[in-house]
Amino acid sequence: MLPLARAIVGVARDFLRLVVSFLRSSCALRAENLVLRKQLATYIERGIKPRRVDHATRVGLALFTRLFDWRDTVVIVRPATIVRWHRMGWRIFWRWRCRAGRPPIPPELRHLIRRMATENPLWGEERIANELLVKLGIRVSPRTVGRYMPKRPPGQPRGDQRWSTFLKNHAKAILACDFFVAVTAGFRMLYVFVVIEHGTRRLAHVT
């Protein structure tokens, strides 16, 4: 059996024992606790060194010691070791919760994206993402769509419109504006608002 499987079986066995202990009376649990403490005290007096704890024991001690005041009870390891196991467990938990990157999309959706891009070579990632959302109700980021689109052969035009192409096609209808502050020789503040035509570079408004 692999070490991980043995650790899982050991922790599951400890949880089962904990559940069974809830079914017993509190008097029986206190008596058993006292007997175990006396036996443990005998081992400590004789100076018997326990063997190295396995992974299942580490996980069990890290979990069950959070249920009671364990600092005067656990003697086979130092308190600093238990605290280090607690912190290690939280690091593993948050590393699992905060995995970097997005989960991969299903293979069927990847095949659909490639098929849409192949059958519609003029469609870009934005268009494919919008088609999936509007017609199929599948919300996918355009960046994710672009990641799974087939590579465009050299010389083939892009499906989406570049920013420079957009400016060239709509230059006559675009106005550019800016707002800035100027200080005069007499230390007066002038607030200037300028609007120019993008196609002709002529001033359309100055305030």
Image: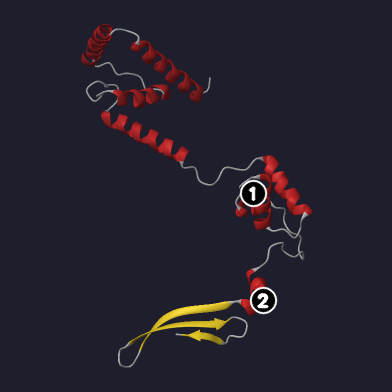
Tell me which label, 2 or 1, sits earlier in the chain. Answer: 1
**Label 2 environment density (alpha carbons within 10 Å; few <14, some 14–19, many ≥20):** few
Percent from the top left, x then y, of residue 145?
A: 65, 51
Which quadrant would residue 156 be assigned to in this image?
bottom right
Farthest residue, direction bottom: 185
- Give the alpha-carbon distance from disc 2 to disc 1, as whole Å: 30 Å
Number of residue marks: 2
Give amino acid for label 2: Lys
Report the front residue among 117 and 138.
138
Residue 67: which numbered mark, if any? none
Residue at image position (49%, 42%) is 99
Quarter holding residue 161: bottom right
Residue at figure coordinates x 62%, y 51% from the top left = 144
Image vertical order of residue 20 relative to residue 98, above or below: above
Residue 20 lies, in percent from the top left, at 38, 11
Q: Residue at 30% x, 23% y: name it.
A: 67
Q: Is residue 98 above or below residue 125?
A: above
Label 1 SS? helix
Residue, disc 2: 168
Q: Quadrant of the C terminus?
A: bottom left
Q: Between 185 and 85, which is closer to the camera in this rendering?
A: 185
Q: Name the residue rendered at 63%, 74% in the picture.
A: 167
| Number of residues whose C-alpha sits closer than 10 Å to that of mark 1, classed few (under 14), some (14–19) or many (20 or more) | some
**In-front residue for pair 58/127:** 127
Q: For residue 83, which quarter of the picture?
A: top left
Local SS, label 2 = helix
Q: Amino acid at mark 1?
A: Leu
- For label 1, the residue is 133
Residue 29: x and y, percent? 28, 9
